[in-house]
Image (tube, rainbow, N blue to C red):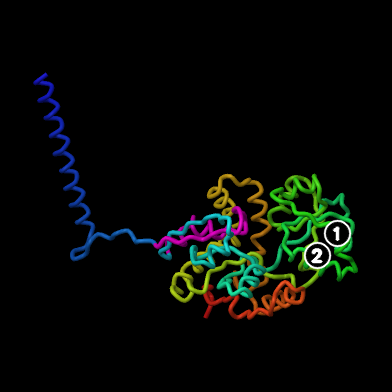
Amino acid sequence: MRKLGTLLLVCMLILVVAGCGATRNNETNQQAATPAGETPSTPKTLKDVKVVLDWTPNTNHTGLYVAKDQGYYEAEGLNVEIIQPGAGGSDTMVASGAIPFGISYQEAVTQARIQGVPLVSIAAVIQHNTSGFAAPVDRNIKTPKAFEGKTYGGWGSPVEEAVMNSIMENDKGDVKKVKIVNMGEADYFTAVKRDIDFAWIFYAWTGVEAELRGEPLDMLYVKDYAKELDYYTPVIVTNEKQITDDPELVKAFMRATSKGYQYAIDKPEAAAAILSSSVPDLDKELVLASQKWLSPLYKDDAENWGEQKAEIWQGYSAWMYKHKLLDKPLEIESAYTNDFLPQAK
């Protein structure tokens, strides 16, 4: 036993000496690789930043995931975490300053500004409104007037009936002849098989999914029936305090995010693969098909991704005021800005 103990002690000493030698060799090599008078570089400290989504991850959000995956945020000194909204929603989290950035909608920002809530839209994710009323083709809803006598499934917002009324009036229809029910937590495909005839969807996700399912839709895009309804949905938002206290952070975040969406515009297949890898629970086939459909529409006819136009904000807010969805006209200058986009002068 004494001999065995001695042998173990010797072995341990050999390992320690060898380790010390390796450490000295590593230090020597590191010193040799570092020019005289300079110290070895240390990892760059990244600033932790959160961005909150408006809903579960989908191709509206691809640019964020690309920017994170491709190191665009890290190159700006940011460690970005993409999170899903809590019970209060993304607007509340951003407006309160709990989270610096989020995904919202022009409608929500407009209503928030009227109520004195300091949300500010800093980029349009999609240049034109890709939402509309969708119905299975067997319901024979080809025009807004055909909504009459049908059941609409919604989420209980007064905006829904106002939009429906607006486009039905132009088609000599009567919104009072539409039965409006709350869909609750049911998804579109479940609801139309159960108790509704049509609903308001984003075609890039639900419409493309219908294609993949072999369940063709009649899709009535709201922008095709009233130009005021071609508003920005979704948008990226921050709050006034964030802009005042740290405008450089907003610029850095938007530089990286813009690169992420430009990548998704240029490389839809690769961008779809990144989103699917980042959110494994998503249906890969749906993500790819949706991305191919949506990528050309991020920028569309705008000169640069993210740009917002005064006439869009003015037109939609005037429409909301006309339909008594706002208590007063919107001061559009405070609601949005292009100043933090990379191409801003």
The one nearer the camera, 129 or 19, is 129
Badge nearest the viewer, 1 or 2: 1
Task: Tell me which corner region of the image, top left, top right, bottom left or bottom right, holds residue 163.
Answer: bottom right
The answer for how far apart the CA atoms under marks 1 and 2 are is: 9 Å
The residue located at (60%, 53%) in the rendering is 56
Report x, y in % for residue 262.
Answer: 57, 64
Other-residue count near label 2 (Cα within 10 Å), few / some / many at <14 / 14–19 / ≥20: many
The boundaries of the magenta stretch are: 47-75
Q: Quadrant of the N terminus?
A: top left
The amino acid sitting under disc 1 is Val
Q: Quick one: label 1 or label 2, which is nearer the N terminus?
A: 2
Q: Is residue 316 above or below residue 30?
A: below
The amino acid sitting under disc 2 is Met
Report x, y in % for residue 94.
Answer: 53, 65
Q: Residue 11 vs residue 203: left or right?
A: left
Judge whether residue 276 is colored magenta.
Answer: no
Res 164 label? 2
> Residue tagged by mark 1?
178
The one nearer the camera, 216 or 100, is 100
Report x, y in % for residue 124.
Answer: 61, 69
The residue located at (71%, 49%) in the rendering is 209
Q: Is residue 56 above or below residue 308?
A: above
Secondary structure state at the residue bearing disc 1: loop
Q: Residue 166 vs residue 72: left or right?
A: right
